Image (cartoon, helix red, strand yellow):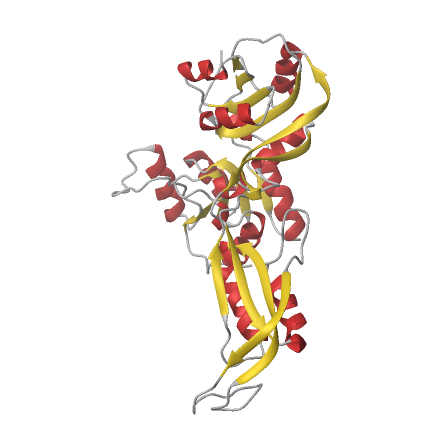
Amino acid sequence: MKIKEIIAVLEEMAPLAYAEDFDNVGLLVGDSEAQSSGILVCHDALENVINEAIAKKCNLVVCFHPILFSGIKKITGKNYVERAILKAIKNDIAIYAVHTALDNHSEGVNKIFCDILGLENTKILIPKQNFIQKLVTYTVPDNAQKVRQALFDAGSGTIGNYDNCSFNSNGIGTYKGNSKSKPVVGKRHKLTETEEIKIEVTFEKHLQSRILKALFDNHLYEEVAYEIYELQNSHQNIGLGMIGEFENAMNEKDFLLFVKDKMIANGIRHSAFRGKKIKKVAVLGGSGSFAIKNAIQAGADAFLTADLKYHQFYEAENKLLLADIGHFESERYTKNYIVDYLRKKILNFAIILSEENTNPVKYL
């Protein structure tokens, strides 16, 4: 199959529109029209991983972290990024990164984190802002169900655990067509009044072109009246971090030992013990110091993340237990999830989990 067909599956798993603006996700190297000989899934697309892909005859590397994160002006092999890219290009190997597109997904990095720990009743810690739009349109009653269903099929009308959500109200529409018009209801040059239904649905903004196509393809009128608004509502099912609860609370030391075992962490740096049980836990895979205040506001007893600096441990303010379990460790199960997802969606195809450990941090 072509690489672009695999990309379509990856974007079902982690839509690129979910990614943060600062990120660099999607196809970073390679030709999407090329035929794929196999997929190697890894955490970081380093030179040793590209060598592994060559050895295992995989010409598509799917990585979590983008090997190309910021702009570069030369590719001469002078550093680990350039060496990996050069080797990939020389060997016709494509590189695709998911990163925050999967971070922000409700079933992504942080849900995986929560599931490994056995946290229940999970929800997004920092819901994504400015991501929901509303479509308002008008049509005659006989056409309303067709239009609504088309909009739902295109991805609109989902709110939390509910789909096919819309609001509909009755009214009177008026119009008068000119000499070039072809009215379906009424006649040219004659003012027409007709019963109409106002249909309102919300949708994720990256679906706008698909939603409008569905509207135009299924609407009865020659000229379709519609409005699109950007809503200030946060998206409760997309965003960074997650928070959940243990069925049974545990003391702080036992909690950290439990986390260390489950996440295979070589060490955990943490703030001072508060002498309180841990039941409600916030997590954010990767660098999550910016979310300390969100974890506190959410009432978490503990916040698990990585890459905390010295002074950031003070920000716990004795309001929660703050723990740095390591960047790689907090995301270590992500590549397993990607492999499992691809194997369910693409049958009878070489999808291989990388055996290379790309964690740059070592412990004595």
> Which residue is located at x 67 percent, y 13 percent?
277
Q: Quadrant of the N terminus?
A: bottom right
Q: Position of residue 249 (x, y in %)?
A: 71, 17
Residue 114 placement: quadrant:
top right
Q: Is residue 134 visible?
A: yes
Residue 165 image position (x, y, % from top left): 65, 57
Relative to 225, is 274 above or below? above
Q: Name the outermost residue toward the left.
A: 73
Furthest-right residue in view?
247
Q: Say if 324 sits above or below 122 in the image.
A: above
Q: Position of residue 100 (x, y in %)?
A: 48, 40
Residue drawn at x 62%, y 57% is: 157
Q: Looking at the image, which residue is at 49% across and 51% down?
A: 231
Horizontally, residue 198 falls left or right of residue 53, namely right
The quarter of the displayed image where residue 314 is located: top left
- Place of residue 300 in the rendered image (x, y in percent of width and height, measured from the top left): 60, 23
Picture residue at 50% right of the left edge, 68% below the top:
226
Residue 37 in sight from this viewpoint? no
Residue 131 vertical position relative to residue 242 in the rendered view, above or below: below
Q: Please tell me which residue lies in front, 248 or 356.
A: 248
Count every numbered label the image shows and give the total: 0
351 left or right of 119 in image: left
In front of the other: 181 or 272? 181
Q: Which of the pair 82/249 is nearer the observer?
A: 249
